[in-house]
Image: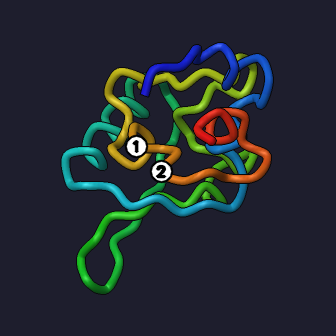
Amino acid sequence: MNYDNRICINECRAMCCRGPLVIQLTVSENELLKSTGKQLQVPVVSSVTMDGKYILKFSDHPGLHCPMLDSETSMCRIYDDRPKVCREFPLKVTPGCFISEKLR
C-alpha cells in the first residue's frame, strides 16, 4: 500500500497502536521486540498462549499502547522491522481510521 505515513502521525496519532489491543507475534518478532526494548530501555511484556503463540497485550504496557510507539511523536520505534500484523494493517476498512477510509 502506498500512502503518506504523515497521516498516521499528524491526523490520527497512530490510533491503531493504542488501546486494549492484543497482537500475535512470531518467535523472531518477539525476540526482536524484547532485544530492541532492552536497547531502548523500554520494557516489553509478551506472553505465550496455551497453544504456544506469542502475544503482546497493549494493556500490559504504560499508556495502553504498543511499547514501540513513541507516545510523544506517535512514531513507531521499529517501523522498518515492525511485526507482520502491523505491516499488513489495515486489511479492511475500519471506521475512524484515516488510512483504511482511503481504501474505499
Which residue lies at the image location 53% right of the left edge and 25% below the top edge? 76
Mark 1 Cα within 10 Å, few/some/many (few <14, many 20+)? few
Which residue lies at the image location 38% right of the left edge and 34% below the top edge? 82
Q: Quadrant of residue 86?
A: top left
Determine whether 18 is above or below 102 in the image: below
Left or right: 27 in relation to 102: left
- The spot of residue 12 in percent (x, y) is 77, 31
Left or right: 55 in relation to 94: left
Q: Which residue is mark 2?
A: 91
Determine whether 3 is above or below 63 in the image: above
**Does the residue at mark 1 contact the one at mark 2 (Cβ under 8 Å)?**
yes
Which residue lies at the image location 49% right of the left edge and 22% below the top edge? 77
Looking at the rendered structure, the kind of residue marked 2 is: Leu
- The one of 97 and 43 positioned closer to us in this rendering: 97
Q: Quadrant of residue 31?
A: top left
Left or right: 28 in relation to 44: left
Considering every residue shown, the one lying at the far bottom of the view is 50
Q: Secondary structure at mark 2?
A: loop
Mark 2 Cα within 10 Å, few/some/many (few <14, many 20+)? few
- The spot of residue 19 in percent (x, y) is 72, 54
- The spot of residue 37 in percent (x, y) is 43, 33
User: Which quadrant would the C terminus be assigned to in this image?
Assistant: top right
Residue 88: assigned label: 1
Which residue lies at the image location 26% right of the left edge and 83% below the top edge? 51
Looking at the rendered structure, the number of numbered marks drawn on it comes to 2
Looking at the rendered structure, the kind of residue marked 1 is: Glu
Q: Secondary structure at mark 1?
A: loop
Residue 54: assigned label: none
- The one of 84 and 27 positioned closer to us in this rendering: 84
- The spot of residue 14 in percent (x, y) is 68, 33
- The one of 30 and 99 positioned closer to us in this rendering: 99
